[in-house]
Image (cartoon, helix red, strand yellow):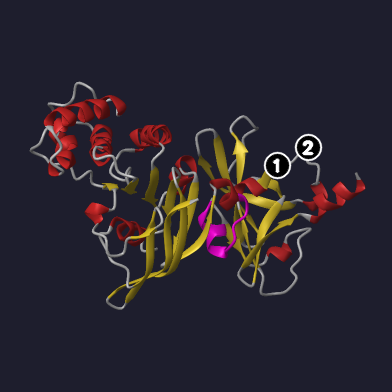
Amino acid sequence: MAYVELHDINKHFKKFHASKDINISIEKGKLVALLGPSGSGKTTILRMIAGLENPDSGEIVIDGKVVNDVPGSERGIGFVFQSYALFRYMTVYDNIAFGLRVKKTPENEIKERVTELLDLIGCSGLEKRFPSQLSGGQRQRVAFARALAPNPHILLLDEPFAAIDAKVRLELRSWLRQMITKLNITSIFVTHDQDEAIEVADEIIVTNQGRVEQTGTPQELYKNPATPFVAQFIGQSTEVQNFDEFKCFEKEDESQTSFIRPEFVSIFKKGESLQFEKSAEEAIVEDIIFRGSNLEVKTRIHGNLISAVRSINDPAVEIGEEVFVFIYRLYVVTNDEVSLLINSSIAEEAIVI
């Protein structure tokens, strides 16, 4: 059952239409990512749910109640900001206790709650330190605890890992996922990092130019993009207009275009065993990028620079080397609808088998 709902929400900033007919439904206890490029409207949505911005039209519903006219302080929401927003001259203890003191909570209850949260975030023993004495990861954990202190019904996070270095960011992603699962609190976080959204979220809402492009689980969005924007934004895709020049791919009409992901492509050195050799393209390696556990190999085919993934354990290929490239599948865009097109040589062999 939906716990947070947005119905036909529109928001303008002067002449700029930031949110266009937004309809969102979020279930209780879910961790949902608002994912999109800069300026896509994701932060505006978050701020309207928080009560920091008011929609021009439409309804915001929390737990069955329309809250458009309810002040943000009365919506039961905790907010974690990108910049931590900790009070520099307050200790960790006082930062976490701040919201409780605003609510005039008795000091004995504050002490119990702050102690509980320090233990939860793994910062016990740091309560007397100031923010300047903490690492970036510790500061974000304290900001998380401060938002949780008043026992909110919803937790909102605005790019919570943006100010943290890459290694700590990876650690905090797993930590955040574990904490929210443990607390079972409905949570919505904004990010422009698709890896972050895919790794952490139960569900992703993709935004673009003020609209919701698609909503679904990370797997649903990755495997079944509904719009051209999602097809190129999720994953690493190359747009190819002339895909009918590839062997075993045909266009239904000239207006069709396609997107190819590296995992849809395999590269073979000449002399390596290749099942669909007659359907493979000859290509020249133009660039090789080390990606840790594998290599991204870029080749030129019919004027298109196509990327493929190759294991570092496979025989090495070199820039300038002539190779075979086999394209297993690609996404085809027809009248703004996306479908998966399989290399016909694979389909034919499946029929023979």
In this view of the protein, which residue sits in the foreground, 72 or 105?
105
Q: Which residue, given by chain and number where applicable, does mark 1 sit on?
A: 268
Residue at (18, 30) in percent of width and height: 109
- The C terminus lies in quadrant: top right
Residue closest to the far left: 89
Q: Is residue 230 above or below residue 274?
A: below
Under circle 1, the secondary element is: strand
Q: Amino acid at mark 2?
A: Ser
Under circle 2, the secondary element is: loop
Residue at (38, 36) in percent of width and height: 176
Query: Badges 1 and 2: C-beta atoms under 8 Å apart?
Result: yes
Q: Position of residue 54 (x, y in %)?
A: 28, 66
Residue 26, magenta (yes or no): no
The answer to whether residue 41 shows anywhere in this view is no
Q: Position of residue 120 (x, y in %)?
A: 31, 27
Residue stretch in magenta: 223-234
Q: Which residue, given by chain and number where applicable, does mark 2 sit on?
A: 273
318 left or right of 145 in image: right
The alpha-carbon separation of the residues under discs 1 and 2 comes to 8 Å
